[in-house]
Image: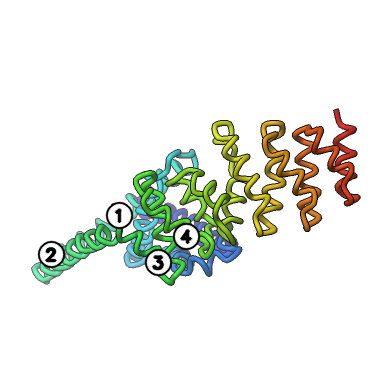
Amino acid sequence: MRQLVDKVVLRIIASAQGLLSLVSLVMTPVLFNYGGAAANPTAFQLLILFWLWGAVSAICLFSVRLWARLLVLVWNVVLLSYVVVAFLRAGHRANAERALLAVSTLVTAYLLISAGSPLANAYRQSPHRRTVRRWMLFVTTVIALALIGARLAYSASHTQRALAAKLDSPTQDTRCSAAQQLALRGRAAAATLPKLTAILGTTSCIQWGSDQLPEYIEAIGDIDPFLELMKNGNGRAVEKAAMQLMYRPRHYATRRTSDLVSAFADGLHNSDLLVRRTSAAALGTFGMSAAQAAPDLIRSLNDPDGEVRTLAANSLGRMHSVDGLKAALANADSAVRHVAIYWSATP
């Protein structure tokens, strides 16, 4: 009866692990889309190998052999370790994360207990128990020393000075990894902000389809680095700053509306077309709170780019600027006049 129960449990574990590995194997390239695999090649390759290992070991588990059980046990120990670390780091814990942690713990515990009894019997029946004990002691010592050495090496390579030095690396993956570690330190890593903003224009830390580098910078310096870039920056870095300020949730907008409006007003005069377009569109989201930027928007009605002109007219309409709408109605661009007519007719 016990063997039957064990066989059924192993089949359930093998089926669940196999399904999880195959689905994850298919989804990983999708999640790393938009340049993610190129920006994070190490993480991408390790994930692919891990899911392949999980799928193969799940198939092996249908044999109910001890070696297959041990292979799956190691895979689940790695998965559980990752889940525990992610669980402890998470600021909030969803029910799905709790369920994954509980299931991973139960599966690992079952495999450990069920594999322990055959291993103990094999040890008791072995005529080379003394040799086995020596090898176990040797392997345990080597693993312990390796873990201690890895921990010391990790600590030495993850000091703030060492992480800041990695931001100068020619490898984008190294720069992104250092930026992520610095972001976890929050305000304590404020001294590294100049270097982080310096690489913003040349580095893209793609994760799950979006660039995380602006998020890392905001975690350390809030929006101040982006405000400074909008005023004095240039090139791709300013584009990213403008997009970050526009598309981030407005949890800080009520506190710093005047700063944001000033930043986007500066963006209207930037030589970068995307920055001007983003700034012209963003000012309209503040409505009448952005009235101080009306003169800048009125000047943008004569921007060389047609889209900037229409976006500026739309923002002037959203803030109900009488002078702005008058200027738009008198503009030579018919698209600008149409926008002004629409807002003039809107209560």
Q: CA distance from mark 4 to mark 3?
A: 10 Å
What residue is shown with label 2?
A: 137
* Secondary structure type for disc 2: helix
Disc 3 versus disc 1: nearer the observer: 3
Is residue 116 something one can see in this rendering?
yes
What residue is shown with label 3?
A: 168
Q: CA distance from mark 2 to mark 1?
A: 19 Å
* Secondary structure type for disc 4: helix
Disc 1 residue crowd, few under 14, some 14–19, many 20+, Cα 10 Å: some
Proximity of marks 4 and 2: CB atoms separated by less than 8 Å: no
Instruction: Name which residue type carries label 2.
Output: Leu
Label placed on residue 112: 1
Residue 133 vertical position relative to residue 107 in the rendered view, above or below = below
Disc 2 versus disc 1: nearer the observer: 2
Residue 283 vertical position relative to residue 69 in the rendered view, above or below = above
The mark nearer the N terminus, 4 or 3, is: 3
Disc 4 versus disc 2: nearer the observer: 4
Q: CA distance from mark 2 to mark 3?
A: 43 Å
Q: CA distance from mark 4 to mark 2?
A: 50 Å
Disc 2 versus disc 3: nearer the observer: 3
Instruction: Name which residue type carries label 3.
Output: Asp
The mark nearer the N terminus, 3 or 1, is: 1
Taking 292 as reference, is 309 left or right?
A: right
